[in-house]
Image (spheres, rainbow, N blue to C red):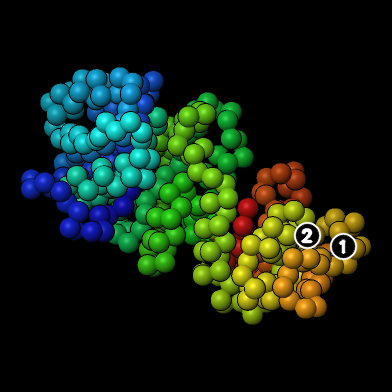
Amino acid sequence: MLARGDPGAIGPARAPAQVSVILPVHDAEPWLDECLGSVLQQDFEGSMELSIFNDASKDKSMTIIEKWKKKLEDSGILVVIGGHDSPSPRGVGYSKNQAVAQSSGSYLCFLDADDVMMPQRVRLQHEAALRHPESIIGCQVTREPPNSTERYMRWINQLAPDQLLTQGVPEDLLFFYEHLRKGGGVVRVDQSLLLYRYHPGAATHSVLETTIWAHRVRFLEEQALPHWATFTIWNAGRQGRRLYRSLTAGSQRKVAAFCDVDENKIRKGFYCYEDSQERPKPRIPVLHFRAARPPFVICVKLDLTGGVFEDNLRSLNLQEGRDFLHFS
């Protein structure tokens, strides 16, 4: 949840709601009944509206929406419906923007059509938003099915408050980064307030990994690397080398070393970037992590080594955000 940032985006003239639930919909027939039922079950006592934008659904989504519209409005929740019936959908980002534009709430609560809110979600996140008006308000989540993406679920639910800024990368990456660029914060309600479904048709799968990578590199170069004269890439393997190759020439020149625990990589002694335009081509030392100097950009995935990597990192007594950042 977040406070509306653009007062000009209020939409049609009417008494504004305190909270607008923003719901983009595209072919969501299998999940919509449960999703809309969870809106009806909210225990929030303030004024609330549901802003739906139908992105060219070809199934029975609109039939389900019309059925729930009366139930919701009878309970005091205004329902605003927009959409289009073009041959092809225009995407979840477009749909969210349209749903926001037609909404009136002072606070926006984003909901995907395949997810389910716990009854206290709007109330607790609204209370947190009032206490932290410059912050995005998140929450812990429960995954459905329960055994899917276990590492991701442990990571997202166990981030410490300061790690919400240094590691938190939600699905709406560009919005999140722009919020941080403008000095916004991130706060989490430490209760599971959302049932988050994992299935092959989820919008998350439509975002190219290369696109996400490119935006993350750009943000790293904007926000962290200007503060460091030099840094070490922790991982001399494929991911670490990929990060090095993705950096601008200026950032590449700041890479003092790679570090690793793999004796074969360390024994080789250096990494040579063959595609570099510089002459002579850079030969970056490869060191054992205990011989390397911070700050580090860490390209090692968490929760994959039985705790060995995490123990190695803790043994250096470093401060996240100052001495190292995670990039995996």
User: Which residue is drawn at the image coordinates 33% and 23% (left, top)?
Assistant: 58
Marks 2 and 1 in Cβ contact (< 8 Å): yes
- Are there few (<14), some (14-19), or many (20+) residues within 10 Å of tag 1? some
User: Which residue is drawn at the image coordinates 29% and 27% (left, top)?
Assistant: 36
Residue 300, percent across and down?
A: 70, 53
Camera-nearest residue between 262 and 215: 215
Camera-nearest residue between 32 and 62: 62
Asked where in the image residue 239 lies, by quadrant, the reply is bottom right
Q: Which mark is residue 266?
A: 1
Residue 265 visible in the snapshot: yes
User: Which residue is drawn at the image coordinates 73% and 47% (left, top)?
Assistant: 307
Q: Amino acid at mark 2?
A: Ala
Real-space Cα distance between discs 2 and 1?
A: 8 Å
Kindly give the residue lying farthest to the front in the view shown: 87
Above or below 193: residue 247? below
User: Which residue is drawn at the image coordinates 50% and 52% (left, top)?
Assistant: 169
Asked where in the image residue 317 lies, by quadrant, the reply is bottom right
Residue with the mark numbered 2: 236
- Are there few (<14), some (14-19), or many (20+) residues within 10 Å of tag 2? many
Asked where in the image residue 50 lies, by quadrant, the reply is top left
Camera-nearest residue between 246 and 104: 246
Residue 162, percent across and down?
A: 50, 60
Above or below 192: residue 267? below
Side of 305 where 157 appears, left or right: left
